[in-house]
Amino acid sequence: MASTEFNIKTASRLYYGGYYDRLVEAREALELLFGEMEYELLNKNGRNPIEYIKARIKTPASMEEKLARLNKDGLRLGAQDLFDGCGTRLVCTFIDDCYTIKSWLAARPDLILVAEKDYIRHPKPSGYRSYHLQVRVRTDIGQWINAEIQIRTISMDCWATLEHHLRYKKHLLNKSMMASELKRCADELASTDINLMIIRDRIVYDKEDDSDETLTGR
Ligand code: 0O2
């Protein structure tokens, strides 16, 4: 294991205490579930909608920042009351895949859907797009643990990753100009995502047309 990764793991273990193992179990339970979903959707539709999957245990610094942010409103929350201690991200090919995946997950008996936020239909003012599910997942020892599942397309993921890096650059010149440029990029990517679905449908339609011609001998 690389030493940075080792340090992050050790720091997280110390920070979360006994709850760290629960978070790992939740991540493992979700990873198994995602494998099952990929297999089923591939068999059903002839295409796996998932491009790649990411998972992380929230770092102590990020958790502290979030708790401080929420406590401003007078809330007193521990890591166990939040959902994104165990965060997973499903990155898929097309926008409608996000909704297929969401419906598949929502129907699972080993997952309780507590809340959902559709930042795809209702993007954040920054331009951020993603579908967030706050869930309780059943681990292999039968415990229900809070977790967050984010579902987004490749382009939404690309944008969010870059924006996340830039947000933490403390000495960024002309922040408001950068913010409006990023918003413009997010909107352009969203429009490209829609065009890609149109092209996909056109290709599928053309294929069906071809097979009709073969059948009728035209
Ligand atoms: P980390 O630890 O670095 O991954 P939620 O309540 O979680 O459904 P909400 O209300 O937006 O969503 O909560 P929050 O805490 O603002 O964001 C939770 C996570 O959503 C973030 O984790 C990001 O992964 C993602 N996210 C939300 N808004 C944005 C955004 O404007 N830009 C980007 N790039 N990501 C966003 P963190 O905080 O990055 O934590």
Image (spheres, rainbow, N blue to C red):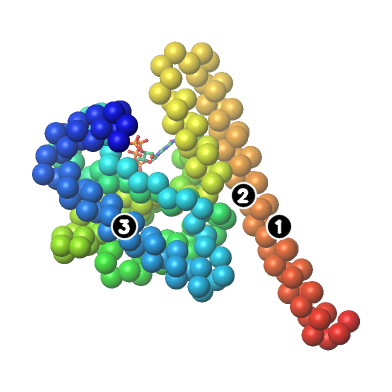
State the residue lying farthest toward the right.
218
Upstream in sequence: badge 1 or badge 2: 2
Residue 90 image point, x, y percent: 43, 52
Q: CA distance from mark 3 to mark 1?
A: 32 Å
For the residues bearing labels 3 and 1, Cβ distance under 8 angstroms: no
Residue under numbered circle 2: 193
Residue under numbered circle 3: 30
| Viewport quadrant of the N terminus | top left
* Horizontal side of residue 34 vs 155, given as left or right: left
Total marks in image: 3
Q: Amino acid at mark 2?
A: Asp
Q: Amino acid at mark 3?
A: Leu
Residue 111 image point, x, y percent: 28, 63
Q: CA distance from mark 1 to mark 2?
A: 10 Å
Upstream in sequence: badge 3 or badge 1: 3
In the image, residue 163 above or below residue 80: above
Mark number for residue 199?
A: 1
* Horizontal side of residue 184 vs 13, given as left or right: right
The 10 Å Cα crowd at callout 3, few under 14, some 14 to 19, many 20 or more, is: many
Which residue is drawn at the image coordinates 72% and 63% (left, top)?
Answer: 203
Which residue is drawn at the image coordinates 48% and 31% (left, top)?
Answer: 163
